[in-house]
Image: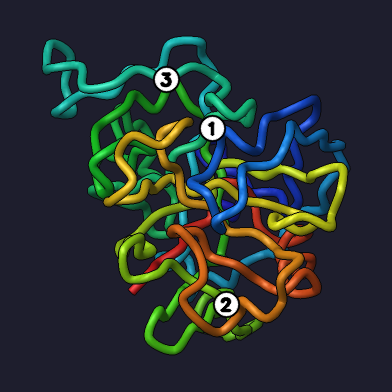
Amino acid sequence: MSCASRTERRARGRTVLSGVIAVASLFVACSTDEPIEPAASTSTPPAPSPSTPRARALERHLIGHAKVDDVRIYSAPREGSTVVATFGRVNDQGAPQVFLLQPDERGPDGALPEGARWVNALLPVRPNGTTGYLRVRDIEVFATDYRLEVDRAKFRLTLFEGHKRVLSVPVGIGTGDTPTPTGRFYLASLLEPPDPDTIYGPYAYGLSGYSETLLDWKGGGIIGLHGTNAPDSIGRPSSHGCIRMRNEDIKKLVPLLPLGTPIDIR
């Protein structure tokens, strides 16, 4: 089977939303400032990611794009089990609804086994780390070799392609009262504010994770990964949980990373 099979395709790089999205409703506040006004973004055709050698097939990360209006998440991989959540094709931020898949089994090329009917997925809900099973027929499966890792102690974000370190840059993180949560998450949305000279910089990703201390924040308290107009806030605790990057650094991620790319925060 080739790297792009019937049950899996290469995830495309840049995924920028089209339309008007309220960035303010997406993230927990990333500073003591008020959230910004609605942000518009444009759509740019992405380029395919490079192919993956067979030896690294099992390290690939599988992403599920909702392709039906009613994606039901079950507590177990069988009909009749409890429905724990339901999602549409588009999430609350206006982005395509994606899930980071965590298959119980894989084929020899790293894809879902032929004939797989169910797959476990990491869900963008509280509490962080929640998983459930969805029907393979309800999603289109893509793959990426990329993953992000954030080391809070070192204020460092690293981009990996397989085991290869592609980029390592400083970041700002949450403060003691509003820490950046730890665990595995994924990129759930991407926005391009019309004014890059704001606390969000030129691009802002919404993650699948939530603040564990701001429980009543407007929009749910989603954690963001974004640029900033305050470069002096990089390399130290400076936010209400979001991860801040230098503008020139986040611009390097956007052409490469599809929605669904995993991000491990420790």
Q: Earlier in the sequence, mark 2 or mark 1?
A: 1
Q: Residues within 10 Å of mark 3 (few under 14, many from 20)?
A: some
Residue 199 x %, y %: 70, 57
Vertical order, 241 against 124 (above or below): below
Q: Residues within 10 Å of mark 1 (few under 14, many from 20)?
A: some
CA–CA distance between discs 2 and 3? Answer: 32 Å
Vertical order, 265 against 240 (above or below): below
Which residue lies under the disc numbered 1? 65
Q: Earlier in the sequence, mark 3 or mark 1?
A: 1
Residue 45 x %, y %: 87, 42
Q: Earlier in the sequence, mark 2 or mark 3?
A: 3
For image coordinates 66% across by 58% down, the residue present is: 257
Q: How many marks?
A: 3
Q: Amino acid at mark 1?
A: His
Q: Secondary structure at mark 2?
A: strand
Which residue lies under the disc numbered 3? 87
Tell me if label 2 and label 3 are in contact, CB under 8 Å.
no
For image coordinates 37% across by 86% down, the residue present is: 153
Q: Residues within 10 Å of mark 2 (few under 14, many from 20)?
A: many
For image coordinates 49% across by 83% down, the residue present is: 155
For image coordinates 42% across by 41% down, the residue present is: 221
Q: Amino acid at mark 3?
A: Phe
For the C terminus, which image quadrant?
Answer: bottom left
CA–CA distance between discs 3 and 1? Answer: 11 Å
Which residue lies under the disc numbered 2? 171
Residue 158 left/right relative to 258 = left
CA–CA distance between discs 2 and 1? Answer: 29 Å
Q: Which mark is residue 189?
A: none
Q: Secondary structure at mark 3?
A: strand
